[in-house]
Image (tube, helix red, strand yellow):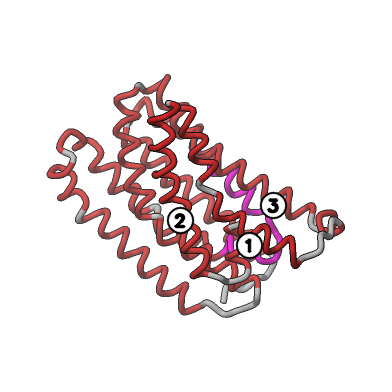
Amino acid sequence: MNGFLLGRKLFSTYSKFFLSQKILTVIFGLGFYSLFGFDGVIYGLVLSYVPYIWILIKEFSTTKLNFSLVKSRKGFIINNYGMNISGAVGGQIDKIIIAPILGFELLGNYSLAMQFLVIMLLLPTIIFKYLLTQDSSGQKTGNLKKISLLASIGIAAFGIIILPMLIPIVFPQFIDTTIAIQILSVAVIPATIGTFYESKLLSLEKGKFPIISKSLGIITVIFGFLILGPIYGMVGLSITILASSFIETIFIVIATKTMNLKIR
């Protein structure tokens, strides 16, 4: 449903439903947890999507089902599903490797550092959702991309210069993550650039290239963690994540250039 709202460029409605779902997740999750234990959290998560039923009912009442469209778009659907799978694998494979091989202490430091990276990546995540709708309709977004790139550089600078000053104050027990966060901050820049090209490719239904890009990133993480992790610890893990981000972006840029596509 979120994809539907974004595709229709209903950004205000998307924001309302998105925030409502997150708020209901907390309310239902805590409420059902107190009643049914851990299983209740799952029920709460499911019920948090109840507001989207209104959109389903409205669309089914005004739109005729056409299953032939599924057949004509099966390649794009499969690629999209593949992207979701690769994203889920990429989000968990790092923790699966770290815990048994490098220990839970390093996993704790790594998790904190990654939380900072996730926050810094909010900008490219939001920009990507907007760019995809604009690229799909052939709109020019050059100015927005320039502003986004400058903003990503500013965010990276903040992570390199300011965060190392704040971490010892706010998280004194995680001082070891300081250098790692500085390294990870640089990843915001290639990640932002990658969204420009990924959006263009997906708008043209060229989903196989983003899948290959994500797969290369996962492979880089696996080998980097196994090789650099035991030797350099947090620094090795951070360098691996940064290298993964650069490799994903470089591949997707080359793929776009190969097809003579212009990022406007």
| Front residue of this view, candidates 255 and 141 | 141
Residue 204 among those drawn in magenta: yes
| Disc nearest the viewer among 3 and 1 | 1
Discs 2, 1 touching: Cβ within 8 Å: no
Is 220 part of what is drawn in magenta? no
Residue underneath mark 1: 4
Q: Residue at x 58, y 65 (%)?
A: 6
Q: Residue at x 84, y 56 (%)?
A: 67
Question: On the image, numbered disc 3 is attached to which residue?
Answer: 208
Upstream in sequence: badge 3 or badge 1: 1
Residue that sits furthest to the left in the current view: 169
How far across and how far down the image is residue 79, in percent? 70, 50
Label 2: which residue? 20
Q: CA distance from mark 2 to mark 1?
A: 16 Å
Q: Position of residue 125 (x, y in %)?
A: 47, 58
- Decide: few, some or many residues near mark 1? Use Cα within 10 Å; few <14, some 14-19, many ≥20: few
Q: Residues within 10 Å of mark 2 (few under 14, many from 20)?
A: some
Is residue 156 left or right of 124 when viewed as pictured? left
Q: Assign a secondary structure to mark 3.
A: helix
Q: Nearer the viewer, mark 2 or mark 1?
A: 2
Q: Which residues are magenta?
A: 197-217
Q: Position of residue 16 (x, y in %)?
A: 47, 63
Residue kind at label 3, given as amino acid type = Lys
Q: CA distance from mark 3 to mark 1?
A: 21 Å
Magenta-colored segment: predominant secondary structure: helix
In this view, the residue in front, 170 or 27, is 27
